[in-house]
Image (cartoon, helix red, strand yellow):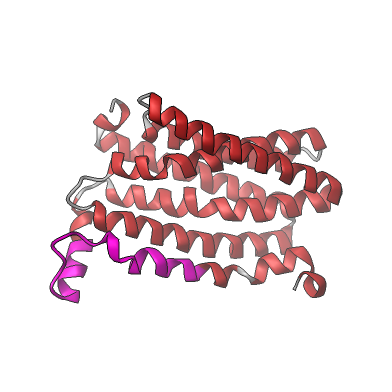
Amino acid sequence: MLRKFGYKYTILYIPPIFLLNILQPLLFIEQLPLKKPKSVSDLLKSYIYTFKGSVTPFFLLNSLLGRGVQLSVLMLVFSHISSEVNNQTAVISSTVFGFSYLVSSLSLTLILLKLKLNCYVTQIIFNVTTGLACWLAAAFNIPVVYYVCSACLGVTHGGILAIKGAFIIHIYPPDVIEYLYGLSGAVACIGSFTFPLAGGYIQKYYGGSYGLYFFGAAAIAGGLMLVIAGLFRRDLWMS
């Protein structure tokens, strides 16, 4: 596909593959509680029960906008860099991203073992940082800006990987986490399918800069969803 269609159109056509990821969290046996539902109806009622809390929809929107956009950002940002500057800059940016990702995921995991970190606030910071990095990459076609933005994206992506489990446990009450963990993952998978598709079309018809502005806005909107949720549960800011 890369040889026949090029990078831009390959990214446009492959998102349906990522939709298959939705099957994993939905069918993951261990997500079910010890007292398993006796029927499909009971299972659906259990999922619906999780929406009784007013904050649940905002957490799921964060999964859709914030975590679902991660894959989209990576696919579009390096395509944008390659088209605006050159392939060498895109390769260097990708290397910077990978190194930052590694350092962030390892270091933040160690920090979590030693320090009490508010994963809720950290997630919001990561969402906003991702959005700003996208906007900077779209606004300035300069290699050094791309390197800095790639480093920021690597830190946020690696950090989200490290705090994902702690963040979800931090948010969801124990009696519904078996359902919401899988549901949150499924919603994020929907985002990983829809956002690359939308970004590919935006890049195709309007240019890569507009695609990055779109992704940046989505990432920041994901953080905004958590801020709204925090207005309903003030304990999230302190715990």
Q: Residue at x 48, y 48 (%)?
A: 66
Main secondary structure of the magenta stretch: helix
Q: Position of residue 70 (x, y in %)?
A: 55, 50
Span highlighted in magenta in the image: 19-47
Q: Position of residue 110 (x, y in %)?
A: 46, 30
Q: Nearer the viewer, residue 216 or 45?
A: 45
Quarter of image, res 9: bottom right
Q: Is residue 115 above or below residue 132?
A: above
Locate the N terminus by quadrant: bottom right
Quarter of image, res 187: bottom left
Is residue 154 in the magenta section? no
Q: Residue at x 38, y 24 (%)?
A: 115
Seen in the image, is 59 located left or right of residue 201? left
Q: Is residue 136 above or below residue 23?
A: above
Q: Position of residue 135 (x, y in %)?
A: 65, 40
Seen in the image, is 14 located left or right of residue 40? right
Q: Position of residue 12 (x, y in %)?
A: 67, 67
Seen in the image, is 197 located left or right of residue 184? right
Quarter of image, res 157: top right
Total numbered badges shown on the rendered structure: 0
Q: Is residue 205 visible?
A: yes
Q: Residue at x 66, y 49 (%)?
A: 212
Q: Residue at x 29, y 66 (%)?
A: 29
Q: Is residue 132 visible?
A: no
